[in-house]
Image: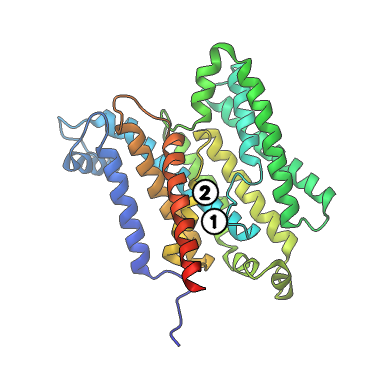
Amino acid sequence: MKKHREHFSAGAYGLFILAFVGTALLCVCLGSVPISLRDTVACLWNGLWGTEIPAGIAKNIILNVRLPRVLNVALCGAALSLCGAAMQGLLQNPLADGSTLGVSSGASLGAVIALALGVTGASGGVMGMAMGFAFLSLLLILGLAYALDKSLSTNSIILIGVIYSMFVSSILTLIISFSGEKLRTITFWTMGSLSGTNYGHAGLLSLFLALCGGVILGHARELNAFAMGEDNARHIGVNIRRVKLTILIAVSVLIGVCVSIAGNIGFVGLVIPHMARMIAGPNHKRLLPASLFSGAVFLMLCDLAARTVLSPIELNIGVVTSLVGAIAFVTIFYRAGKGRDRGC
């Protein structure tokens, strides 16, 4: 019997990187002002090595507007997709994603409160409030789940997370109703947008993706064990409670950072892991890296569509991901259902 690789080969990673770089270049080239691939590559190359950029190249558009935005979009997509794959494996639920815990809702609440009160501080106030509320939400949800069930079972966590999300949604609606002149800003933010993001945001996302993403990727073996059920995982030596808390904290922190910078972007963590699973299979040692790269490419393409489809009008990226994600999700499960019917 042929033995399947547990990890991707160097060639497979090469293809992922090629797809990532190609998509990033496409997104930097295209926009309300199209720039040729040759000029884009020349500008990026000279900018990287600190040499003089040839005259006639739209340096400001490439280096100060599009490149930082594309980097932030890619990092957010990678983080959200990775969190979704981890949550689906941890909770053994195909409908789980990074927002299942309700942490995404908590981060949104913090950011909306900051926007409503005008506590912006060059976006630091919004970011700080979002991350703070994300962490407090995690503590509250895990505390309630522990009070309900000392074993922190999957069903308890999902139940508390859903209830908490509904509660926060009602508070958000109440705040938006009384937001007055800040209604437009809050509404725009809640639909997700990465316009105006800079290299500082990209650095912050890179740092947390490296730290929290490294923790998630390092628990691929344990997530494979969870796929066999918590009892079986416990029998082969997995510390169920410790692994759950570790992954939940890593996912929550990463989601909180993404929401604080990009707002609410739906369906990435829900749909992309299913697509990646069709490519990489269920083994999390392959699925997690595939989800990370696929999420980055997917969100970059969605952001490109948001910027160009109705140019010069720019759509919120959350609108595009919801439209594309909903169609993709229905298609995936329709095909999966047809496959099960044929197998009967």
Q: Quadrant for the N terminus, please.
A: bottom left
Disc 1 from disc 2: Cα separation: 7 Å
Image mark for residue 145: none
Residue at 61 percent across and 64 percent down: it is 223
Q: Residues within 10 Å of mark 1 (few under 14, many from 20)?
A: many
Q: Secondary structure at mark 2?
A: helix
Circles 1, 2 touching at the beta carbon (< 8 Å): yes
User: Quadrant of residue 24 in the image?
Assistant: top left
User: Quadrant of residue 125 in the image?
Assistant: top right
Residue at 52 percent across and 68 percent down: it is 283
Residue at 31 percent across and 51 percent down: it is 21
Q: Secondary structure at mark 1?
A: helix
Image mark for residue 85: 1
**Is residue 302 depicted above or below 130 in this figure?**
below
In the image, 90 versus 211, the foreground residue is 90
Q: Is residue 110 left or right of residue 305?
A: right
Residue tagged by mark 2?
269
